[in-house]
Image: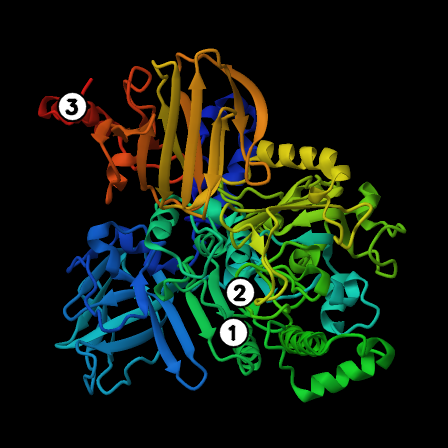
């Protein structure tokens, strides 16, 4: 399907684009007249160019001053740009810089910027032509309490001065909009003249003059708005069967959309959920984990150390303007909570209650200002998240919509939640009204979803952390009410019109099993369970923007819909929570808590009890009230659920591998105590090995061996113990134990005894010998390959396989490692 969307990277239509394989076309020379026509057509279009993003061009530009360090440590609300591809020696030339432009509402306005210390120059090689330069400029002083800032920004092409802005007397820490028409002769040189002031050129873009005119020949790319409603439960939407529509705007939009009937989030709180659907990958597999708000340095290292696609990055590289408007810190790197996904512009309001109206006003202003260019807008409202404080007029409206007989059956927080849902819908309605006034609504793709649901049911009030200090919240459990969210996609009309209902009537069916039967034929339904892992590949699939070799892993529903084929089924839906996880099928829900986090309570002062696993038969018990993992009648289903969970292997984890050598004595009693920095996730061990975990980080391993004893292989946990798979091992072979870790921290502390005597342990890739615990050994403990001499070692051996995070060891370093090992042997650190 040709929907006129720009392709990835350069996006220029040129001779090379049309005829890159010219010499392979000699076989079709008889069609030369047709080819000539195509050539003329292609050349007529060859001047079409996408916007030039100067931040992304920095890696090709020359800079007078290479900036590899932070010049302004006093201003902590910033980070080096993470998506520009600059080397470490230049990493601060692209800075994501945040200004607190309104302290009353904690407004943090962050831009991806080109950084100019005094005297800095950048020289870009660009195509000739006339462009509209657009940017926001901001200034900081060399010193924190500097009273005034000044300087001149000059733009040159060749030796010709195109524009000069004198910024003397400008306010600090405020963004100033600049636009100018520039005619370039093949280059652009930007020069900052100042003695003591630092300039940030935010979101610097060059739009070719023919940009908007080209849309008469090329269809305009479709703008995209992703609306994320924090804590939105699916079952309070009229579109999903709630009898009293408190969300009329979104219910109407659902009637015009690709409608997912039973969608689930892949995280039960904001950070793991948002990161997973922006990347179409589980948060832990991105290196970010699921346990707490902060993003640790080792997590950043793993995340930024690998090439990863995300929605903001993909749309930006496709020529879209990328904007987030939110009350959410998880997309701001400097907070130490979030990450830099590559948005041009991030508008974040931190003041609760007043934030929703401010954010909606900003979104309305944004779609108005950008109506003539393609954009990707992430619009994230914090309502109806607690504290459930709707405006009085919305509570009055809900009282008129919901009958008293039903309204007063709800507890007070739920009543207020309904008011927040109505308020959220009203604010989204203001944005939709503006899009219609602008004539943009029909051709804009709009996605509505929630990052997670909200726990209300007293039957499900099981907590470990008690972060919310109340039952009404999220992040603690994995019941459907906490992870079942709305999810529908309103397609641009030009795309929706290409879908032929007659070819796949099941997509448009109104069967009795569907959620609601009074919607028009324009609604496309996806029956059965689905997950938000599909969000990124599906919307990019509809727009033909999914990059080659993309790292998105979810289902692309656009393919089956556009081709009118049956859509794939998401058999297993995996969700992460704080030190917990769940797998959902159409038949069962399996919930598992990590070692050290298996104790739950009904209230923060209640009696603790162990609940390592939960299992619910969703066919017989859809409200998830009867935990089958605790009773004999659930044993068969529990065996199936555990086997499914281990076979699917949803998360990639580092493994601390422990090898215990065979014993030469008639009876051997081995004991290993260990403290694992990365916390315990799971383990694999032979049946003869006993493993006990006293906390999230501590584990004791014991084994008794006799002459006649054989072994069976065992994998995983069973009620904090283990489950078996058959495998035999001779007594002459070492036993291997694998401790999988939650976080990509590499270190471990240990002590090993055999028959009561402490003996040395060999360590890491080189097999260094130590009697007791080590510290600061991360670089030594990792070995991505099995260490040489392991099977012949008379001593236990411990190493981290780096299976998830890697060691960063190059092939050259691996060869050097062999030489290092020889040197260590000659120094007496390794004894063969």
Relative placement, left or right, of 724 versus 78 is right
The residue carrying mark 2 is 377
Is 509 positioned to the left or the right of 456 in the image?
right
Q: Name the N-terminal-most of marks 2 and 3.
A: 2
Residue 420: x percent and y percent? 66, 77
The image quarter in which residue 54 lies: bottom left
Measure how far apart labels 2 and 3 are at the Cα level.
54 Å
Residue 554 image offset from top left, x and y in percent: 59, 44
Q: Residue at x 18, y 69 (%)?
A: 117
Q: Is residue 778 above or below residue 304?
A: above
The answer to whether residue 1 is visible is no
Q: Left or right? Give the position of 109 relative to 556.
A: left
Which of these two is toward me, 206 or 613? 613
The residue labelled by disc 1 is: 366
Q: Is 126 situated above or below 435?
A: above
Quick one: SS at disc 2? strand
Return the residue at label 3. 819
């Amino acid at each position: 399907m040709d929907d006129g969307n720009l392709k990835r990277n350069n996006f220029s239509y040129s001779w090379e684009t049309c005829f890159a394989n010219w010499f392979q076309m000699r076989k079709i020379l008889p069609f030369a007249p047709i080819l000539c026509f195509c050539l003329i057509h292609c050349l007529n279009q060859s001047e079409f160019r996408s916007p030039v993003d100067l931040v992304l061009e920095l890696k090709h530009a020359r800079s007078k001053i290479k900036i590899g360090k932070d010049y302004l440590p006093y201003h902590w609300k910033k980070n080096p740009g993470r998506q520009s591809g600059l080397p470490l020696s230049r990493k601060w030339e692209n800075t994501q810089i945040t200004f607190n432009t309104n302290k009353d509402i904690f407004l943090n306005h962050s831009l991806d910027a080109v950084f100019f210390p005094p005297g800095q120059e950048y020289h870009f090689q660009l195509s000739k032509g006339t462009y509209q330069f657009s940017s926001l400029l901001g200034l900081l002083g060399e010193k924190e309490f500097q009273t005034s800032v000044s300087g001149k920004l000059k733009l040159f092409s060749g030796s010709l001065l195109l524009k000069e802005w004198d910024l003397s007397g400008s306010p600090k820490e405020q963004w100033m909009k600049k636009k100018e028409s520039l005619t370039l002769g093949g280059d652009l040189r930007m020069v900052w003249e100042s003695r003591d002031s630092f300039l940030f050129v935010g979101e610097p873009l060059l739009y070719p003059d023919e940009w908007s005119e080209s849309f008469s020949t090329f269809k305009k790319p479709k703008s995209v708005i992703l609306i994320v409603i924090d804590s939105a439960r699916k079952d309070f939407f009229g579109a999903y069967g709630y009898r009293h529509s408190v969300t009329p705007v979104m219910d109407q939009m659902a009637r015009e959309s690709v409608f997912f009937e039973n969608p689930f989030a892949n995280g039960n709180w904001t950070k793991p959920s948002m990161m997973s659907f922006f990347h179409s990958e589980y948060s832990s597999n991105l290196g970010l984990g699921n346990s707490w708000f902060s993003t640790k340095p080792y997590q950043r290292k793993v995340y930024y150390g690998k090439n990863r696609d995300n929605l903001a990055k993909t749309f930006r590289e496709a020529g879209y303007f990328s904007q987030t408007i939110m009350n959410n810190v998880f997309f701001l790197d400097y907070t130490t909570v979030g990450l830099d996904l590559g948005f041009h512009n991030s508008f974040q309001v931190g003041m609760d209650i007043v934030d929703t109206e401010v954010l909606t006003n900003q979104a309305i202003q944004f779609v108005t200002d950008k109506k003539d260019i393609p954009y990707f807008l992430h619009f994230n409202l914090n309502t109806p998240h607690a504290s459930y404080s709707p405006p009085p007029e919305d509570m009055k409206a809900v009282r008129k919509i919901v009958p008293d007989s039903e309204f007063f059956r709800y507890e007070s927080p739920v009543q207020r939640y309904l008011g927040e849902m109505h308020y959220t819908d009203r604010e989204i309605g203001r944005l939709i009204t503006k899009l219609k006034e602008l004539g943009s609504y029909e051709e804009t793709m709009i996605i509505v979803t929630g990052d997670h649901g909200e726990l209300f049911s007293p039957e499900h009030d099981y907590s470990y952390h008690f972060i919310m200090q109340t039952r009404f919240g999220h992040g603690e459990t994995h019941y459907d009410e906490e992870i079942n969210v709305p999810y529908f996609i309103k397609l641009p009309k030009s795309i929706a019109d290409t879908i032929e209902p007659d070819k796949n009537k099941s997509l448009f069916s109104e069967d009795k099993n569907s959620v609601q039967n009074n919607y028009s034929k324009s609604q496309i339904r996806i029956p059965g369970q689905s997950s938000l892992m599909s969000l990124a590949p599906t919307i990019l699939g509809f727009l033909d923007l999914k990059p080659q070799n993309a790292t998105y892993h979810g289902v692309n529903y656009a393919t089956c819909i556009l081709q009118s084929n049956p859509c794939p089924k998401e058999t297993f839906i995996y969700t992460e929570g704080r030190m917990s996880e769940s797998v959902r099928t159409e038949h069962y829900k399996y919930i598992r808590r990590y070692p050290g986090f298996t104790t739950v309570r009904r209230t923060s002062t209640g009696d603790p009890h162990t609940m390592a696993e939960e299992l619910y038969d969703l066919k017989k018990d859809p409200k998830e009230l009867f935990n089958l993992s605790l009773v004999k009648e659930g044993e068969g289903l529990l065996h199936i659920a555990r086997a499914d969970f281990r076979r699917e292997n949803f998360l990639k984890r580092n493994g601390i591998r422990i090898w215990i050598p065979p014993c030469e004595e008639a009876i051997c009693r081995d004991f290993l105590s260990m403290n694992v920095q990365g916390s315990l996730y799971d383990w694999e061990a032979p049946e003869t090995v006993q493993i006990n975990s006293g906390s999230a980080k501590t584990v004791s391993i014991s084994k008794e061996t006799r002459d006649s004893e054989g072994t069976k292989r065992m994998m995983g946990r069973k009620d904090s113990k283990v489950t078996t798979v058959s495998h035999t091992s001779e007594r002459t072979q070492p036993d291997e134990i694998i401790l999988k870790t939650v976080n990509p921290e590499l270190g471990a502390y240990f002590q090993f005894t055999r028959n009561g005597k402490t003996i040395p342990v060999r360590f890491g890739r080189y097999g260094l010998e130590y009697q007791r615990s080590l510290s600061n050994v991360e670089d030594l403990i990792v070995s991505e390959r099995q260490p040489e001499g392991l099977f012949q070692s008379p001593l236990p051996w411990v190493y981290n396989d780096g299976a998830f995070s890697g060691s960063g060891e190059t092939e050259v370093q691996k060869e050097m490692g062999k030489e290092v090992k020889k040197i260590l042997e000659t120094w007496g650190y390794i004894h063969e």
